[in-house]
Image (cartoon, rainbow, N blue to C red):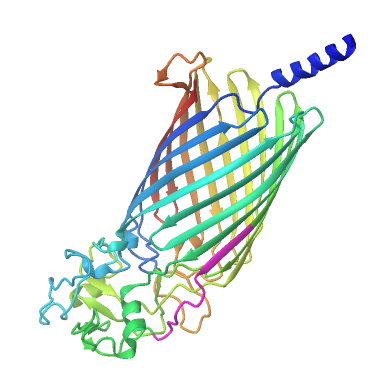
Amino acid sequence: MSIGFVSNAQNDSLKVYKKKVLEAVEVDLLLGYYNQEGIHASVTGGVGNEELENFAPTVVVNIPLNEDDVLTADFGFSAYTSASSSNGNPFNTGASSGERDYTSGGDGSGSGGRGPKGSPWVASTGASRKDVLTAINLSYVHATDDRNRYWSSNIGSSFEYDYQSFGFGAGITQLWNEKNTEISLKAQVYLDKWLPIIPTEIHEYELFGSDFLFNNQSYFSGVSVLNSSGASVIGYLPSNYSPIDDVKRNSYSFSLGFSQILSPRMQFSLVLDLVKQEGWLANPLQRVYFSDRTNYYVGNANSISNYENSSNTDVFHLADDIERLPATRLKYPFGMRLNYYVNEYLVVRSYYRKYLDDWGIYSNTYQLELPVKFNMNWKLTPSIRLYDQTAADYFAPYNEHLSTDEFYTSDYDLSAFSSYQIGGELVFTDVLSEYNLWSLSLKKIGLRIQNYQRSDGLSAFSISTNFSFVLD
């Protein structure tokens, strides 16, 4: 009886004092701001204003359900204003949404034809100029008693004005060799759906047919369409256009990760990914122009010769079609990390990633971070990231595609370019939990700043903060 009592007491003691995966509820408050400028707007066919501002607050709550299980809820939204997206309908500059602006030669004489003005360099007041993406995600992690195996699952959804996404996934992580070796497997599925918004001139053609320029109900009723010489003509038709027949976009990914502690100071990790996408993989709002078709414009005839210059504020090139891309895409990137602990003040973190897909894009990413720890509370991590890629098989700049092509895009994200990003993060860790907000004890504060420059003229700046708390 005594032996049984002692044995049970020991078992109860082990249960009581088993270390939790997460000791207490943690709350992260994140806030990000992003700003960019560029000259190759994809909505206007590869030429135009790419100014964009984005404001993104997020709340992440990590909840320990018991010693072994953690539930994480992630909710946030991203509110942006985009000059490029606004030009889905570029003919609203200076007018209320849905109204035509007849200024700058809009009387049918002298400098231009009768009708709305617009420009790829001027942000429109149309509804697509701004939007809010709302996202919510839930994830669950279960650990075995010896903390050598972790099971995970997740589910989430996001919504914006022209796109909906629903995703779910699961994974497993196994540790061996006294936790010096780790292998992880993860699978993820996204079932997405377009709510297609197409350029105004394409929309009117789809709605009213080949006589949309003469239909009294059409947005272009009574509008003078100009050729490259500035003369009024009646021949404009986006004749390559056909309606979108599949609004779905599904993505399936599988990841294999391996991590090994090579020495007391060095760790190596490898990640292999396989991603398959299918459905409508193009963006229906993005215009394409053909070099073997006549160019047609609306607005000020005198500005046609200056169309690709940012000083053009009052003439717009009517689209030949929207972006067309294959219905499937296979991606197979892999990445490697090597981290080296120099001393208690400095760690070197290096990263390389090779990306390949069956659209003809090959890219390389090189990243270096140098976390410097000043004391128990403060850490500064400067970083640099270098990137280069080849162009997709279906990319061509503004007005250089052929109407006989099966697929085409002028989205410079699919062009050949190189880029660099430099920045850093400053983190304050409240080791002694001296600072409190109601029932929340401060865990750490982070401030990250990044500057991004791309060889095609795109530049961006971002700043983000992270406040982490523990619920008492």
In the figure, is residue 234 to the left or right of 412?
left
Q: Position of residue 298 (x, y in %)?
A: 23, 77
Main secondary-structure element of the magenta-colored stretch: loop
Task: Identify which residue is drawn at 74% across, 23% down.
Answer: 264
In the figure, is residue 263 to the left or right of 335?
right
Please tell me which residue lies in front, 43 or 131: 131
Q: Which quadrant holds residue 223? A: bottom left
The magenta-colored residue range is: 239-252
Please tell me which residue lies in front, 30 or 312: 30
Which quadrant is the N terminus positioned in?
Answer: top right
Task: Identify which residue is drawn at 48% across, 18% down.
Answer: 430
Q: Is residue 250 magenta?
A: yes
Q: Is residue 454 visible?
A: yes
Number of numbered discs present?
0
Instruction: Return the residue found at the far front.
Output: 1
In the displayed structure, 463 sits above or below 14; it is: below
Q: Is residue 415 visible?
A: no
Please tell me which residue lies in front, 220 or 299: 220
